[in-house]
Image (cartoon, grey):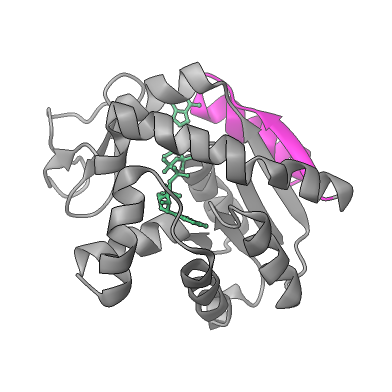
Amino acid sequence: MKLILLGAPGAGKGTQAEVICDKLAIPAISTGNILREAMKNGTEMGRKAKSYIDSGALVPDDVIINIIKERLAADDCKNGFILDGVPRTVAQAEALEEMGVEIDKVVDIEVSDDTIVKRLSGRRVCSACGASYHTLYKPSALPDRCDRCNGQLIVRKDDEPATILERLRTYHELTEPLVDFYKERGKLVVVEGQEEVADTSRLLLEKLGV
Ligand code: AP5
């Protein structure tokens, strides 16, 4: 299955991508994770992306389109994939079509802006392995330490309050138009994000019929 996960920052795309990835044994491709890895490694692409990400803006379309072209050509994508957080602009969605990528379904995870702010301001990520926690909804066993690798938990720079609001503004302006884009193509499935991660997963898998 070839899937796209749409939704505001913090709607739970990354969390649900992991669930679908386990269930269907297809890779989850997050442009956010690819860019953060490039930033960590100090590559040219990472340096270029940093100022956009840290301010809550989108990275330019040409950078993202190159990442996706390269990633989708890999062998593990032959039987399907989950695109988490890409496309994020109409230009990116059109580029996917031009590449001949045939998407089966686009899942839009709907969550209110107020909930988004609560979720993102409580998120903590492991600086070593990238595992994600939440101070209220998914706390680590030891304060500020990763359960998986004991790495230091940190706040993502773009999860700072002013940046969260800017990411939301960018989402409504540039990414939300994709809801209509995929509705017109008959691909859209809407899932209302629930308070419990497992409840969202159950609804999502039901709607995908898997
Ligand atoms: P990216 O990493 O994709 O950021 P994002 O979309 O803002 O995604 P998040 O990881 O913040 O949210 P999510 O929806 O995955 O939520 P999560 O599951 O973590 O991109 C970062 C930046 O890179 C962008 O801002 C942009 O600059 C750039 N970029 C990336 N792709 C790009 C593209 N295609 N074009 C241009 N620029 C691009 O959940 C969030 C929190 O909520 C977690 O703490 C989680 O534990 C908690 N949570 C989740 N579900 C629930 C629930 N049901 N109940 C309670 N808590 C929950």
Locate residue 156, reporting x and y percent.
26, 41
**What span is colored magenta in the figure?**
187-210
Locate residue 11, reporting x and y percent.
52, 33
Locate residue 5, reporting x and y percent.
61, 48
Q: Please say if 169 is above or below 99.
A: above
Residue 11 visible in this rendered orientation of the protein: no
For the N terminus, the quadrant is bottom right
| Residue 198 belongs to the span the image colors magenta | yes
Q: Nearer the viewer, residue 50 or 67?
A: 50
Task: Determine the residue positioned at 58% across, 63% down.
Answer: 26
Q: Quadrant of ligand 1?
A: top left
Q: Nearer the viewer, residue 98 or 123?
A: 98
14 left or right of 209?
left
Residue 136 visible in this rendered orientation of the protein: yes
Q: Please say if 105 is above or below 156.
A: below
Locate residue 106, reporting x and y percent.
72, 49
Residue 206 occupies quadrant:
top right
Task: Determine the residue positioned at 41% across, 23% down.
Answer: 117
Q: Nearer the viewer, residue 76 or 177?
A: 177
Q: Nearer the viewer, residue 53 or 195?
A: 53
Task: Determine the residue positioned at 11% across, 43% down.
Answer: 152
| Residue 200 belongs to the span the image colors magenta | yes
